[in-house]
Amino acid sequence: NPTMDNIGTYRCKVSNDCGSDEMSVEVVFDDSGVSVRDLLNGTYGLYEPRPNPANSMVNISYELPYPMNVVLTINDATGRQIAELYNSNGIEGTNRFEFDINKEQLSTGIYFIILRTNLFTETKALIINK
C-alpha cells in the first residue's frame, strides 16, 4: 500500500520495439483513487481537437478521473493566452466543449489548447486554416 514514505521522484527505463528511454516519474499519493498506471496508460487527459486543421467550429474533449477544477485555454504560438474557454468544475468521465474560431476572431496559424487540472496539465496543437 502507498504511504507518505513512497512519495518522491523515481527514474525508470521505458522500452518498446522502437528502443528505450529513461524518464523521471514523480509519485504522489492522494485519496483520489487515480493510479500512476492510469496516468501512464492515458486513461485521463486531453484528446486531439476535431477537426484539426479547423476553419470554424472545433470540438474539444477531455477525460477526468473524478470531478475537479478545470481551466481550458487557447494560447498562440508565442504562449500568449488568447481565450479562456472554461474555468469551472469538470465532471468525472468525458467532458466535451465546442469552440467557435470565428467568435474569437482567430487568424490562420498554430494554436495550443491547454487543459489544467489539479491532477495534470496537458497541451494539444490546433491548426487553424481559414
Image (cartoon, rainbow, N blue to C red):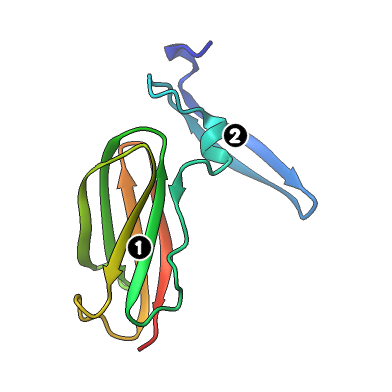
The residue at the point 36 percent across, 36 percent down is 92
The location of residue 111, given as percent across then percent down, is 35, 72
User: Considering depth in this image, is 66 or 34 the residue closer to the camera?
Assistant: 66
- In front: label 2 or label 1: 1
**Secondary structure under the numbered disc 2 in the rendered image:** strand
> Residue pushed farthest right?
17
Compared across the picture, whether 58 is left or right of 88 comes to right
The residue at the point 28 percent across, 67 percent down is 99
At label 2, the amino acid type is Arg
User: Considering depth in this image, is 74 or 66 the residue closer to the camera?
Assistant: 66
**Secondary structure under the numbered disc 1 in the rendered image:** strand
Q: Earlier in the sequence, mark 2 or mark 1?
A: 2
Position above or below: 23 against 32 = below
Neighbour class for label 1 at 10 Å: few (<14), some, many (≥20)? many
Q: Which residue, given by chain and number where applicable, does mark 2 sit on?
A: 11
Q: Which residue, given by chain and number where applicable, does mark 1 sit on?
A: 113
Q: Do the CB atoms of the residues marked 2 and 1 lie less than 8 Å apart?
A: no
The residue at the point 42 percent across, 45 percent down is 63
Compared across the picture, whether 42 is left or right of 55 comes to right
Position above or below: 13 against 30 = below
Q: Quadrant of the C terminus?
A: bottom left
The location of residue 18, given as percent across then percent down, is 77, 55
Compared across the picture, whether 104 is left or right of 120 comes to left
The location of residue 108, given as percent across then percent down, is 34, 86
Q: CA distance from mark 2 to mark 1?
A: 29 Å
Q: Quadrant of residue 60?
A: bottom left
At label 1, the amino acid type is Ile
The location of residue 25, given as percent across then percent down, is 53, 35
Position above or below: 104 against 118 = below
> Residue pushed farthest bottom?
130
Picture mark count: 2
